[in-house]
Image (cartoon, helix red, strand yellow):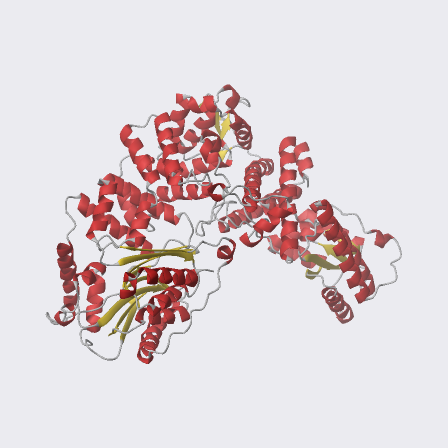
């Protein structure tokens, strides 16, 4: 802990203390001046020093006015101790006492702290003696870290020096290093180990300011220096690397300052709301039109991601070098081959010019790391050499058959593929080898359901695909794990995953553009015609299975037959299913749910039966579901004919749209309640393992669907699926799948509440309340979806298919139902597809109004108005 310069005010007689109001006005005036200068010159370091200097002066005057003991000191700690003060950051202070305070001193301390708050300072403070500081430091790594950057603001130099001396004596650099790196790993886990979130935290995210601070903290604790220049002098990094780190640190500080000023509060997240405004302060502007358009925020974020990527790489190198200094364990290199050695569990280049003399080694090292699971990583020397060797990859390198074979060996590795690809991406190797991949590094996605940049989403999809093969993850994806276990040449799936979104951001259909890239890669790497066709098929149709499962009627044999014709055989079907699941789960934690899982699995199994030679047959499917439902009913001891009264009132469509378990449950619920005037509402935990299933049986009535949606809307329940059915004797038998984040903890109470309240709502039949426009999320406000309404007859001309796309919000489904109710439109099914912050709902409808073209236009216009922001 180095000694900071003593404030000049200590050396001279303190000036006449200023009054609190004067101090507050002075602080405000100086702050405004510093910020105004920043807006003129754009120099963040000058602003940070200026704000700190202003606060130093006010604190010094306030300290002298407080009349505190001569053996007390005011010490800046944390970022303020480091000499930096962001516009809305806390002022972290330690009031250091020579001895425990008596009542008089305690009163003065309380007055002093209150004065600081009255001045408008956001302070984080502690009051401790030197002994207490040492006790707290030993027990809490956060306190120890804050004291590492302690700086005397004013007061007793003697007591401050005593703290420094004892702190330095107690410092254990090895323990400190281990604690800070463990803390860093936990922080990285919180942010999914990636700096490529679409809303990164410029202070805490991997590759951001905190990572740079960790390096300087452990270096300072180890006595290796407290600046990038000093670390370069000690040989821990090169001068060029030191320059890059200074440049990235400057850029992150600049962004953080602008974030504080733009939001007028302590805000360290680059959220969508402010990205464009921040970009414009840097002079960035939007370019292009249509599919080629790029927002100013995209340019800003891509710069941020490239900077964070550099910091991530250099952070690894530096920490490894510092660790080697702190934990010297000389080990004899063990040769792996003429180009590489193994040193202490790490792979090391045999010579400084290994990559220059043997360019193939740039890819060979990743092959070795997949084949040697005992190797923990690369030495810092190797990482640095590889980082600089990335420029060796040019057209000639990519065209070399040896290099193509090595790259395929990485993809075909039985283990370590994800780590290898991530390392290749971090080192800049993957983007150099696949130039089209380099174009999507840091590419934003504003589709309201991806939460990562394109390249990181692709890495997540590859990771998900690999997890299907790992026994420790079989509980997460049991069906996928079962399918991939028998899939031949599963590495082809990784190739498809790598290319499925590679054409994002180019304009045009990324599936079509991507399949061209995939075919070229397969041809260049000498894949067979059969393997090439599979990869190209997967890239072209990676969205198809999701669309069919979530938007089309899976009870329609023609839908299954058409999908079976598309996939052609079991191998293509299985591959597409696996890629679809991996892709959806790699977008956002909000997008995947048990309902989507069931729809995809149902589509897979129904299509597999068709491919196995069993043509789709509605009659056969109906009989199978009825027999299975009857078998379930017998387990509950119901009379053999208990089902007949209800089933006579149900048509084929009902049995085809409901699972056997649903048919059995509804039959049990209604067996003694048929024909009643009072509504029947029953609810249970959904068999899919997520949400609640709600069945409503009531004499059919106008506006029924809208009335039910209105109730769920008021309760903030999300409707995932709705099956609407009318019995032959004029009763509505509707089934809803709803979800809410609180179901898991109190589902019994919620079930009772729904069964009672919804029944009362249907009995009263009060006039429908006007739909409310629920609040949009931040993301939806910044990236609004242009609402779409598409209405067309189905292929048989029996019903109309209504498709609606819009930003998601509370009350949206009720707003749609309200319009349909006004036009007396009958609803047969509703498939609710929520993709993050966007919905794509499909309804099967009919009604007299649809026969009039003028009324159709009016209906579409009103629906558009209902769903718009």
* Residue 466 vertical position relative to residue 90 in the rendered view, above or below: above
- Report the side of 327 relative to 654 (left or right): right
Q: Total marks drawn?
A: 0
Q: Is residue 849 visible?
A: yes
Q: Residue furthest left?
A: 640
* Residue 750 vertical position relative to residue 259 in the rendered view, above or below: below
Q: Is residue 345 visible?
A: no
At 42% from the left edge and 29% from the top edge, which residue is drawn?
368
- Residue 395 image position (x, y, % from top left): 47, 23
Foreground residue among 393 and 634: 393
- Residue 658 image position (x, y, % from top left): 22, 61
- Report the side of 121 relative to 297 (left or right): right
- Residue 93 image position (x, y, % from top left): 71, 58
- Report the side of 338 relative to 237 (left or right): left
At 40% from the left edge and 47% from the top edge, which residue is drawn?
586
Q: Residue furthest top?
A: 357
- Report the side of 429 relative to 265 (left or right): left
* Residue 99 vertical position relative to residue 389 in the rendered view, above or below: below
* Residue 455 vertical position relative to residue 778 in the rendered view, above or below: above
At 58% from the left edge and 48% from the top edge, which residue is drawn?
202
- Residue 721 image position (x, y, % from top left): 32, 61
Foreground residue among 387 and 544: 544
């Amino acid at each position: 802990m180095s000694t900071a310069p003593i404030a000049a005010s200590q050396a001279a007689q303190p000036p006449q203390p200023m009054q609190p109001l004067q101090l507050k006005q002075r602080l405000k005036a100086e702050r405004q001046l510093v910020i105004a200068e920043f807006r003129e010159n754009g120099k963040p370091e000058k602003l940070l020093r200026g704000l700190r200097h202003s606060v130093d002066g006010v604190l010094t005057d306030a300290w002298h006015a407080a009349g505190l003991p001569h053996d007390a000191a005011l010490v800046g700690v944390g970022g303020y101790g480091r000499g930096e003060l962001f516009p809305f950051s806390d002022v972290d202070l330690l009031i250091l006492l020579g001895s425990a305070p008596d009542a008089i001193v305690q009163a003065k301390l309380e007055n002093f702290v209150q004065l600081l708050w009255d001045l408008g300072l956001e302070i984080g403070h502690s009051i401790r003696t030197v002994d207490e500081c040492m006790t707290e430091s030993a027990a809490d790594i956060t306190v120890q870290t804050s004291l590492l950057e302690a700086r005397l603001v004013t007061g007793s130099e003697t007591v401050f020096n005593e703290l420094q001396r004892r702190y330095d004596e107690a410092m254990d650099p090895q323990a400190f290093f281990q604690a800070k790196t463990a803390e860093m790993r936990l922080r990285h886990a919180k942010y999914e180990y990636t700096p490529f979130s679409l809303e990164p935290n410029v202070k805490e995210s991997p590759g951001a300011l905190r990572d740079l601070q960790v390096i300087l903290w452990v270096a300072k604790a180890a006595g290796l220096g407290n600046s990038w220049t000093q670390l370069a002098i000690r040989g821990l990094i090169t001068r060029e690397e030191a320059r890059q780190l200074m440049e990235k640190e400057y850029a992150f500080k600049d962004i953080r300052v602008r974030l504080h000023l733009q939001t007028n509060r302590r805000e360290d997240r680059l959220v969508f709301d402010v990205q464009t405004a921040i970009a414009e302060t840097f002079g960035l502007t939007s370019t292009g039109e249509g599919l080629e358009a790029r927002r100013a925020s995209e340019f800003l974020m891509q710069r941020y991601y490239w900077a964070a990527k550099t910091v991530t790489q250099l952070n690894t190198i530096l920490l490894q070098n510092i660790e080697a200094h702190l934990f010297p364990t000389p080990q004899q290199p063990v040769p792996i081959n003429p180009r590489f050695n193994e040193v202490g569990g790490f792979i090391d280049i045999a010579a400084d010019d290994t990559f220059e003399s043997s360019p193939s080694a740039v890819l060979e090292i990743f092959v070795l790391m997949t084949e040697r699971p005992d190797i923990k990583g690369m030495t810092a020397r190797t990482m640095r050499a590889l980082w600089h060797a990335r420029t060796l990859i040019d057209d000639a390198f990519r065209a070399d058959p040896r290099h193509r074979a090595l790259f395929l060996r990485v993809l075909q590795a039985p283990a370590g593929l994800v780590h290898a690809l991530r390392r290749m991406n971090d080192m800049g190797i993957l983007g150099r080898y696949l130039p089209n991949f380099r174009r999507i590094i840091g590419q934003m996605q504003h589709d309201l359901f991806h939460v990562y940049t394109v390249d990181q989403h692709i890495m997540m999809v590859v990771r998900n695909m690999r997890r299907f093969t790992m026994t420790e993850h079989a509980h997460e994806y049991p069906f996928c794990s079962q399918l991939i276990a028998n899939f031949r040449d599963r590495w082809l799936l990784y190739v498809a995953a790598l290319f499925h979104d590679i054409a994002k951001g180019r304009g045009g259909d990324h599936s079509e553009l991507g399949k061209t890239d995939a075919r070229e890669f397969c041809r260049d790497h000498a894949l067979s015609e059969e393997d090439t066709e599979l990869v190209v098929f997967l890239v072209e149709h990676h969205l198809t299975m999701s669309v069919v499962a979530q938007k089309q009627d899976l009870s329609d044999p023609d839908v299954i037959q058409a999908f079976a014709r598309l996939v052609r055989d079991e191998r293509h079907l299985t591959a597409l299913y696996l890629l679809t699941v991996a892709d959806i789960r790699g977008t956002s934690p909000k997008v995947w749910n048990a309902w989507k899982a069931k729809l995809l699995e149902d589509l897979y199994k129904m299509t597999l039966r068709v491919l196995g030679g069993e043509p789709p047959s509605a009659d056969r499917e109906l009989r199978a579901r009825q027999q299975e439902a009857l078998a379930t009913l017998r387990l509950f001891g119901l009379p053999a004919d208990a089902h007949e009264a209800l089933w006579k009132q149900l048509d084929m469509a009902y049995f085809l749209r409901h699972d056997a378990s649903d048919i059995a449950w509804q039959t049990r619920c209604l067996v003694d309640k048929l024909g009643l005037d009072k509504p029947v509402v029953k609810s249970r935990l959904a068999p899919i393992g997520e949400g609640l299933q709600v069945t409503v049986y009531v004499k059919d009535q106008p506006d029924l669907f809208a009335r039910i949606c209105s109730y769920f809307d008021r309760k903030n329940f999300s409707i995932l699926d709705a099956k609407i059915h009318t019995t032959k004797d004029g009763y509505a038998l509707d089934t809803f799948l709803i979800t809410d984040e609180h179901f898991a903890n109190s589902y019994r109470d919620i079930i009772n509440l729904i069964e009672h309240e919804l029944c009362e709502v249907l009995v009263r039949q009060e006039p429908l309340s006007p739909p409310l426009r629920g609040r949009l999320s931040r993301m939806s406000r910044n990236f609004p979806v242009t609402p779409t309404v598409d209405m067309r007859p189905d292929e048989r001309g029996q019903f109309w298919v209504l498709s609606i796309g819009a930003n998601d919000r509370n009350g949206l489904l009720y707003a749609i139902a309200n319009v349909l109710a006004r036009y007396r439109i009958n609803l047969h099914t509703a498939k609710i597809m929520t993709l993050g912050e966007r919905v794509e709902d499909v309804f099967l409808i009919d009604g007299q109004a649809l026969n009039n073209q003028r009324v159709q236009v009016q209906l579409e216009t009103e629906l558009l108005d209902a769903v718009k922001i």
